[in-house]
Image (cartoon, rainbow, N blue to C red):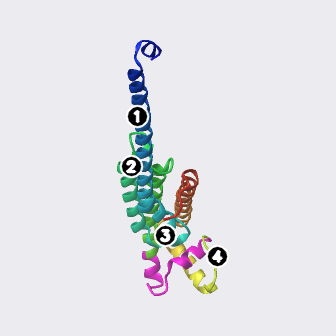
Amino acid sequence: MVAIFLVSPIEARVSIIASTLTAVTLLFYVSERLRESALRKLDYWNKKVLTPEYRVLEGLALLFSAEYRADHLGRDRDLLKRYARYGRFVSLYPKNFIPTLSMAQRYLIEYDKVYQKILQEGNRRLGPALFDTVTLFVAIGLQKRSNDDATKVENHRKVLEWAEKTEPGITDKFTNVCNLTLAALTSLRADVETFYVENQLALS
């Protein structure tokens, strides 16, 4: 560049400077366009997956529709894994979110399998009108008793005792899978919260 300036006439120097400024401006423009494009994609996946998941990943409510929620987690995992990227190396979702989604899905499926066995026993012993999941959670200590009377809770404990005769250890298995599922869902929610803070996002 120095050599060109020494031998070039004034017009050539002006042309070189103008070309250099144009290149710098173009790079800045492209960079801004890329940034805007990435932000648009990030906003899209925030609205499509992250915010909806965040709003439901709390409390025992998900266990009332475990199979449905497992299907949705699997769908969201596949969508994010396949499409929620910018370029080859930038993921538009929290770090480790894909494996945690898979783990939560597996726990939900396992929970539903165990729950169905207890539900079948409860319906057989108490009847569909008297057996309910909330009281079952109270009976295993997963939820505090509120308006459930002691007799109702005791009847659900007996359901677990009857289920134990058919499948020994099912109460512990059910309690453990409940806790594992809730822990995985809590982890997902925490991942989304961290991702929001790191990327200055808000719930959509």
User: Magenta span has 123?
Assistant: yes
Under mark 1, the amino acid is Thr
Q: Which mark is nearer the camera, 1 or 3?
A: 1
User: Badge 4: few (under 14), some or many (20 or more) residues near its Cα, within 10 Å?
Assistant: few
Tell me how far mark 1 sits from mark 4, CA to CA.
Answer: 68 Å
Residue 152 image offset from top left, x and y in percent: 58, 85
Q: Which element type, helix, strand or loop, lies under badge 2?
A: helix
Name the quarter where the N terminus is drawn.
Answer: top left
Residue at 48% in and 65% down = 204
Tell me how far mark 1 sits from mark 2, CA to CA.
Answer: 38 Å
User: Badge 2: few (under 14), some or many (20 or more) residues near its Cα, within 10 Å?
Assistant: some
Residue that mark 3 sits on: 63
User: Badge 3: few (under 14), some or many (20 or more) residues near its Cα, within 10 Å?
Assistant: some
Residue 135 image offset from top left, x and y in percent: 56, 79
Residue that mark 2 sits on: 81
Q: Quadrant of residue 106?
A: bottom left
The tag earlier along the polypeptide, 1 or 3, is 1
Residue at 42% in and 57% down = 45
Magenta part of the chain: 120-141
Q: Which element type, helix, strand or loop, lies under badge 3?
A: helix
Q: Is residue 69 above or below residue 98?
A: below
Residue that mark 1 sits on: 22
Tell me how far mark 2 sits from mark 4, CA to CA.
Answer: 38 Å
Residue 182 image offset from top left, x and y in percent: 55, 63
Residue that mark 4 sits on: 144
